[in-house]
Structure formats: structure tokens, C-alpha cells
Image: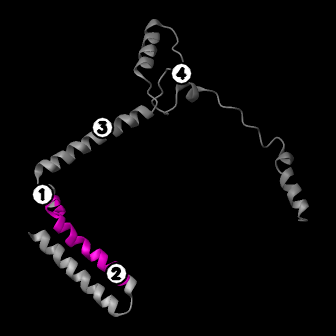
Amino acid sequence: MLAETICSAVSAAGLGIAAVTAYRKRFLAAARIAAYSLVPIGLVLTGIVDWVAGIAFKPSVWLGFGVLAVAWLLFMTTRAVERRGVGTRQERKAAARAARDGAVAPAASAPSLGSGLPATRAQAPRAKVKDQSASPGEDFSDIEAILKKHGI
């Protein structure tokens, strides 16, 4: 009852503003304001306002939203753990079996929890970086060529 009264008042106020805007010869803006102001009364007449009010004040509905939030949280948590690269259940079993037998586990199946990368990439030796101090002339040769081209 209160929601219908508020929606009716908002629609009436909007139509009044639209009339003032049309009086000022801004017909396009007035038509747009009138369209927006008719939406609340249309929602009341279709019964959507009663439906939303019924949903908003029922504890069972909020409990349902809470259950949906917990389900979403569990889903996102499992996805985050899966993306960390822990590996599949079969890979973990193979690694545990290999560790129990004393053999070296395949590097691709060994989980790497810290870096989020498989163990082969985390433990692989890094490529040697070219020592830049060894030949300073080579580093700036292309820059010097560009400067000479422009006469600088």
C-alpha cells in the first residue's frame, strides 16, 4: 500500500516536471521525462511492486540469497585452488606413489603450491642474460645510427 502511494507520487511529480519542461519549449526533454515518470505507475499497475515488496520482506527469500552466496563462494574458491596448479588427483597419487617407492617423481606431475607454476618451470634454470657491460658499443649502435640519420 505504501509502495503504491510512493510510486504514484513519483509519477505525478515527474509528469509535473515534464509539463514545466514542455512549457519552456524543450519538447524532446519533456517527452523523455514523461516516459521516465510513467515507469513507476506502470510497475504498480502490473503488480511488480507487490511482488518485489513480498520478496524483500520474507526471511526465507533472504535465506535463499544467503545459500546462493555460499554456493558462489564455494565455486569460486574451488576454481581459484584449481588454477593454482595443484594438479589433478591422478597426478598427486602418482607423485605420492613415486615418493613412497623412492623413485624420482616426474617433474610435470609434481605440484608447486608456492609459485602457481608446475615444478618444471619453477625449478628450470634461467637463460643466461647477455652481459651488457662487456660491449657497450653494441648496445648504442642503433641509437647512434638514428641520431646520425637525423643529423644530431
- In what quadrant of the picture does the N terminus appear? bottom left
**Mark 1 Cα shell of 10 Å, populated few (<14), some (14-19), many (≥20):** few
In this rendering, the label closer to the viewer, 2 or 4: 2
Quadrant of residue 82 within the rendered picture: top left
Who comes first in sequence, dot 3 or dot 2?
A: 2
Q: Which residue is mark 4?
A: 108
Query: Disc 1 and disc 3: Cα gap in Å?
Result: 29 Å
> Of the residues shown, which amino acid type is indicated by label 4?
Ala
Q: Which residue is mark 1?
A: 54
Q: Position of residue 114 (x, y in %)?
A: 47, 32
Q: Which residue is mark 3?
A: 74
Q: Position of residue 112 (x, y in %)?
A: 48, 27
Q: Is residue 28 left or right of residue 57?
A: right
Quadrant of residue 72 within the rendered picture: top left
Magenta-drawn stretch, dominant element (helix, strand or loop): helix
Query: Disc 2 and disc 4: Cα gap in Å?
Result: 66 Å
Residue at (21%, 42%) from the top-left corner? 67
- In what quadrant of the picture does the C terminus appear? bottom right
Who comes first in sequence, dot 4 or dot 1?
A: 1
Q: Is residue 48 magenta?
A: yes
Who comes first in sequence, dot 1 or dot 3?
A: 1
> Of the residues shown, which amino acid type is indicated by label 1?
Gly
Who comes first in sequence, dot 1 or dot 2?
A: 2
Q: Which residue is mark 2?
A: 31
In this rendering, the label closer to the viewer, 1 or 3: 1
> Of the residues shown, which amino acid type is indicated by label 2?
Ala
Q: Position of residue 89 (x, y in %)?
A: 40, 20
The kind of secondary structure element at disc 1 is helix
Quadrant of residue 122 within the rendered picture: top right
In this rendering, the label closer to the viewer, 3 or 4: 3
Residue range highlighted in magenta: 29-52
